[in-house]
Image (cartoon, helix red, strand yellow):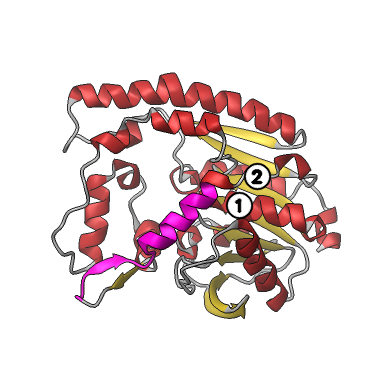
Amino acid sequence: MNSFSCKSNFVNANGIRLHYLDWDGNGPALLFISGMGCSAYIFKQLAPRFADRFHVLAFDRRGHGDSDYPETGYEPNTLTEDLRQFLDVLNINKVILVGHSMGYIELCHFTALYPERVLKLIFLDAAYDMSAPETQAVLAKDPLPGIMPAWPDEQLNTIEEYIATITRLYPFFAAIAGQVMDEQTKHSLKRDPDNKIVPKMTDSISKEINNTFASYSPEFSTIQVPVLSFFAMPDGSDFLSSDYMAEEQKVQVIDFVQKVLIPDRKKYIEKFQQKIPQAKIVEIPNGHHYCFIKQEELVFDKMRKFLLESNSLMAQA
């Protein structure tokens, strides 16, 4: 199937309009949920590869992609109710949830509230607890925020200029630049009254989401369904820029990743495994946070094996 041959549609749920992509397919519903600031189009290369055995969809939560952008409703209960009503409108009773990054909120809270509706969970570098003091302590040591230059003041008049600015300022995104990122970014931008290209997500919405990160502790221990969790183990190279980083700054970034981030992540994975003993863990060496783009083949192979392990899925759906 061509990765761009899918239906784009909307449903009215929980008082707002939610956008989704639908690749059809026969079998259990397989729903992809993006990370913060990303649209459903981020999955347009990976998702359709499962349409031979699953009904594949991707979902824009409120404040993302082509869905509505209310200023409130970004706490776990409302996000989960959005998801529940979305599934109800589409007559999906049971679902396999695949979440990237921020997607852990819907995956964990929906499963805690409606365990009977979840068949399996897949975390795409998403099984984190941003509220944990240990996580906050690690983030506080990250030198990158103090090194990266500020967003330019000059007006960006085209989406192409905006994308070029992102890839110049953030090597992290330059490492996965291409058709998929360009497409998903277009659906996350708009023109403001001055005809300037800006993100659809407002600063106030971003603040609401960050408040949720800081306060929500995912209910890992309540999860009883099969789980597959990818953890990207970066080497630091994707964060380096020769345009604006001095050599000593590059050393600081690499040291942080190798001496602080990776050791903490390994400890976290052990705790995660203890909370969800049935979880299958995939650590990706030199992995990128958007592992389903940069390490697509590995992610696809592991996902497919996990999804097809139990023939009982077909009977449960």
Is 260 left or right of 300, judged from the image as shown?
left
As helix, strand or loop, the secondary structure at mark 1 comes to helix
Question: Badge 2: how crowded within 10 Å, few (<14), some, or many (20+)?
Answer: many
**Residue 140: x percent and y percent?**
40, 31
Residue that appears at 65% across and 53% down: 107
As helix, strand or loop, the secondary structure at mark 2 comes to loop
Instruction: Identify residue for label 1.
Output: 105
Q: Which residues are magenta?
A: 194-213
Q: Which residue occupies the extreme left position in the image?
A: 154
Residue that appears at 77% across and 46% down: 309
Is 279 left or right of 154, judged from the image as shown?
right
Is residue 295 a member of the stretch shown in magenta?
A: no
Q: Is residue 294 above or below residue 86?
A: above
Is residue 197 a member of the stretch shown in magenta?
A: yes
Q: Is residue 285 above or below residue 255?
A: below
Residue 79 location, quadrant? bottom right
Q: In this view of the protein, which residue sits in the foreground, 63 or 287? A: 63
The amino acid type of the residue labelled 2 equals Pro
**Residue 40: x percent and y percent?**
50, 64
Instruction: Identify residue for label 2.
Output: 218
In contact (CB < 8 Å): disc 2 and disc 1: yes
Q: Is residue 149 visible?
A: yes
Residue that appears at 60% across and 49% down: 104
Q: In this view of the protein, which residue sits in the foreground, 161 or 111? A: 111
What distance separates the C-alpha of mark 2 from that of mark 1? Answer: 7 Å
The N terminus sits in image quarter: bottom right
**Residue 110: x percent and y percent?**
70, 57
Is 96 left or right of 172, judged from the image as shown?
right
Q: Is residue 119 visible?
A: no
